[in-house]
Image (cartoon, grey):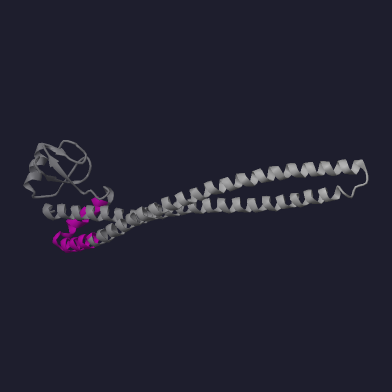
Amino acid sequence: MEANFENLIKLQKLDIEIRNTSVLLDDIPSQIEAIEKKSEESLRIVQDAKDKLSRNQKKRRDLESELQVEKDKSVKYKRQLNEVKTNKEYSSLLKEIEDSNSRIDVLEEEIIGEMLSADEIEREIKSSIQKADQIQVELSKKKEAIFLEKEKAETALKNVKKEKEELLPKIPSDLLKLYEQISWKKDGIVLSPVTEEFCTMCHMRVRPQMVNEIIAENQIIICENCGRILYYQKKSE
């Protein structure tokens, strides 16, 4: 089988570029998904804070409603004091008024506490909105950069594939078939340079006679250990 190392080396280089670029492109959807997830998380923090404020406002309304009920009860009991006829009834109303007033004090304190909490929540909302806006800007820039990288990678992949198509007819069919067989078995790495009598890929020593045959480039030599096509490469290269 006639050796054609220049084209084989070029073919492997193109295949590696195609594989690496394809891996990069395949990873882009997951990068975009991660960015969108972070975006949703930042917006969810804002919404959670707004939901917290809504719960706070509802609780305040409930407390204020209950407070009004207790105030009405207290007024009613005080008005009834003038209508009772026995000391027992009078004492009972006084107890009701006392309990109602105590409940009013508790409710008013709770309402003040919810008002203070509302102020804190509003500050939390403002802060989370500012952070979310900042995150959205940063993520938007990252997404834009990824799409630009995707566009460049797609163009590069198209050009490399075209270059490969132009190269394939220059390689003998039997050599190309061997290349494809080894590529399938060796994860796309078909050729291995020999430097100082060692196979670069598997680091096994190559017999001196075989090294001379590799340097001559008259035929295809397969590494006895890793099964890749060997070609000679000077140390400086």
Residue 104 appears at what percent x and percent y?
Answer: 72, 45
From this viewpoint, which residue is outermost toward the top? 205
Magenta region's main secondary structure?
Answer: helix
**Residue 170 located within the stretch drawn in magenta:** yes
Evaluate whether residue 3 shows in this view: no
Between 106 and 2, the one nearer to me in the picture: 106
Query: How many numbered tags mark residues here?
Result: 0
Residue 59 appears at what percent x and percent y?
Answer: 64, 50
Residue 29 vertical placement versus 96 (above, below):
below
Question: Residue placed at 70% from the left, 53% from the top?
Answer: 65
Name the side, left or right, on which 128 lies relative to 214.
right
Question: Residue placed at 26% from the left, 58% from the top?
Answer: 153
Question: Residue placed at 27% from the left, 57% from the top?
Answer: 149
Question: Residue placed at 24% from the left, 50% from the top?
Answer: 182
From this viewpoint, which residue is outermost toward the right? 85
Residue 213 appears at what percent x and percent y?
Answer: 9, 44
From this viewpoint, which residue is outermost toward the front? 82
Between 203 and 87, the one nearer to me in the picture: 87
Evaluate whether residue 56 shows in this view: yes
**Residue 14 located within the stretch drawn in magenta:** no
Residue 80 appears at what percent x and percent y?
Answer: 85, 50
Name the side, left or right, on which 143 lies relative to 39.
left
User: Which quadrant of the rendered structure holds the C terminus?
Assistant: top left
> Which region is colored magenta?
156-183
